[in-house]
Image (cartoon, coloured by chain):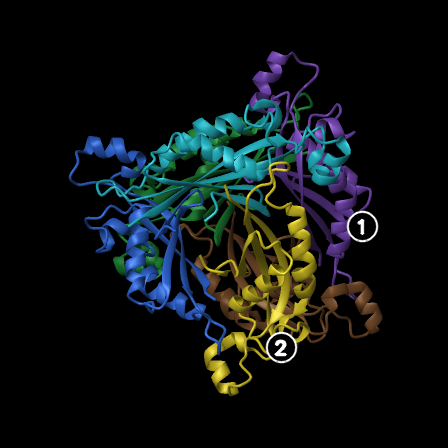
Chain colours: A purple, B brown, C yellow, D green, E blue, F cyan
Amino acid sequence: MKVAVSRLEHFNAAHRLHNPEWSDERNQIVFGKCNNPNFHGHNYDLIVTVTGEPDPETGYVIDMKVLSDVIREKVIAAFDHKNLNLDTAYFKTLNPTAENIAVVVWRILRQHIDTKFDLRVRLYETERNFVDYPAH
Amino acid sequence: MKVAVSRLEHFNAAHRLHNPEWSDERNQIVFGKCNNPNFHGHNYDLIVTVTGEPDPETGYVIDMKVLSDVIREKVIAAFDHKNLNLDTAYFKTLNPTAENIAVVVWRILRQHIDTKFDLRVRLYETERNFVDYPAH
Amino acid sequence: MKVAVSRLEHFNAAHRLHNPEWSDERNQIVFGKCNNPNFHGHNYDLIVTVTGEPDPETGYVIDMKVLSDVIREKVIAAFDHKNLNLDTAYFKTLNPTAENIAVVVWRILRQHIDTKFDLRVRLYETERNFVDYPAH
Amino acid sequence: MKVAVSRLEHFNAAHRLHNPEWSDERNQIVFGKCNNPNFHGHNYDLIVTVTGEPDPETGYVIDMKVLSDVIREKVIAAFDHKNLNLDTAYFKTLNPTAENIAVVVWRILRQHIDTKFDLRVRLYETERNFVDYPAH
Amino acid sequence: MKVAVSRLEHFNAAHRLHNPEWSDERNQIVFGKCNNPNFHGHNYDLIVTVTGEPDPETGYVIDMKVLSDVIREKVIAAFDHKNLNLDTAYFKTLNPTAENIAVVVWRILRQHIDTKFDLRVRLYETERNFVDYPAH
Amino acid sequence: MKVAVSRLEHFNAAHRLHNPEWSDERNQIVFGKCNNPNFHGHNYDLIVTVTGEPDPETGYVIDMKVLSDVIREKVIAAFDHKNLNLDTAYFKTLNPTAENIAVVVWRILRQHIDTKFDLRVRLYETERNFVDYPAH
């Protein structure tokens, strides 16, 4: 009787898409306006989904307040009001696409969520662009 | 060629999270402000998903109007503008967490949706907290 | 050059519409299912709008963080996860309709927002029902 | 390490639900007001999900701009501000239910998205009615 | 102490923008794809705002259930799942732009809402296009 | 018979709040995490409202397509995927608070919208923070 529990959190960040091994011209062709050297930014919506059996004593799979606190301490504190390329260790050499941010967030959270639970993340870069990791 | 058809319905209810086998102190520690003895409440959004083959004559998996009527008669009529703990039989002894409400709603609807269809429910307690049952 | 600055905050509460000077029958006729003696509840969205001249040094009419803190300390702390009828002094004798809640919120905040600013509140009881005070 | 990438696009269209092999009376009974001979219409929201491995050089599963362009050229150009029954070849004999529109959209897009990727579509007919194809 | 009370209702309709006194060419130039002779359609969101003093006995400016019933009987019943140009008397000769629909809705409702109240309507044709009548 | 017509457009940008005449310490105290020297960013939603009489021949106050084109050419092209502080002339010395961005957008558009129309802008920096200029 597994239930999936989801919590939405939010962060605002600047970023730039860029592959340092490519020429400026190729970066411009591939990443277009997302390659702007002065950065641009987004309001990111992050949904974290934890799946498991509800505890019979509490009726909770996981306390959403606890889940929210973990996300805020481990992810939001690191990413909110930051420049993803310059201010975080994760994207010094990894391109901060929505895909890569989602994988990084999942890896961070996986260390702090009990392994008896499945874990998934959805990241909205805009209302029109979002990614899920791992994919179903 | 299975298609999943989803219908959103809505109810407003009061509830309180509480385990009667625990002390007041332990209830307060575990459930925090959700344990308020005078209750609090939510606008719940309920999405019911029915999966099956579209009927070649109608192009419907299930008529959404029929699905909406079943949800309203069997779930919304029982829960809307009610106190989940006091006014419904389901939560006399079961804690009305989002997880447990979703499982109860699924069990109610499963009796009224043809067994040839898969059935899932998603319940939003707030825009930031939601659950899915059964989990994928 | 006046600019209006708005901040959205949120609270979840139980309430009941009831006029103690009326018979139960009349209360039932006028307030219908909102008169449920065991209460029901809502996710309330509150938008507070402060209007004034931006400060030339900061570019702020009012720091939204400061505005958010005032709303949380003076309104959300009093109403969130509460029973409006039983747990707050404001609605012991005043019916907690959306209209009356908006007026009460405005009066609370008016004491804490500099009088050089205009002040308005919008309260969403549901996505489909909302009120503004004062009206334009 | 598969990631699912989703893009939301939009079209406005008129349609009518009708089975030409049935009597007018039966059409009216089955399809109700959706059978109106003069049509009605919707703002359709279409979410297209492509699943695969992110390219290590770009960090993209698929460039969302490229995905958006494919959807706009192959689907939106054909359906937006159109009468689905009269102006498109797809629904001359196929009833334009949400289920059938989703399957048609999937078949169109499947021809233009690399077969190394999984493909899914979600179609919102209204905020309260939506379908997914293929179902999980 | 005036409060504005707003209620959201919804209808789905087909329409076409066309001026019968103009040539087809001029209609095409001015109205573009909205001039499609076979119509297109929208999910319209209608917000009706009634402004007045809350009744001291009820705490209501107007009972939102009563307001909802008036909108549904007088507007939604006439427009929902209809072709605005062909199925309603209002737009036989009047072009069903969002502006004109809003004015027509206001005139219909003005006859059924007590004149002691101010009345305004907002009409969303899409999430990105909406109109208010009367303008502030 | 004035109608207000509104159009929503969107841009993503990086920015930093900073007063160059202040010490770093004072900037940090006043602007907090919004003062991050490496910038952060937002998905800005911009609503532009034009008020006037509908043209009797078209039923339009202003063609929303024309309005959308003006906003895109004059505002979105200048701000989207840009660093507001570094990439635009407007915020070289003006702090890019939501208030100041709204005033700048209004001044840009006022030059391109017929003076017979009233003009207002609303800018959402996040779902929870937005501003209106001019204020009612």
In the image, taking residue E81 as reference, residue D47 lies left or right, namely right
Q: In which chain is the residue bearing label 2?
A: C
Residue at image coords 62%, 77%: C92
In the image, taking residue B25 as reference, residue E103 lies left or right, namely left
Pointer 1: what residue? A116
Q: Residue furthest bottom?
A: C23
In the image, taking residue F85 as reference, residue E88 lies left or right, namely left
Residue B43, visible in the rendered structure: no
Q: How far apart are marks 2 and 1 (CA)?
A: 47 Å
- Residue type, label 2: Lys
B24 w.r.t. D23: above or below: below
D126 w.r.t. B96: above or below: above
User: In the rendering, at what x and y percent does residue C119 appear?
Assistant: 55, 55
User: In the rendering, at what x and y percent does residue B29 appear?
Assistant: 82, 64
Residue at image coords 64%, 38%: C58
- Residue type, label 1: Lys
User: In the rendering, at what x and y percent does residue F31 appear?
Assistant: 70, 38
In the image, taking residue F59 as reference, residue F18 lies left or right, namely right
User: In the rendering, at what x and y percent does residue A115 appear?
Assistant: 81, 47
The disc at residue C92 is 2
Q: In which chain is the residue bearing label 1?
A: A
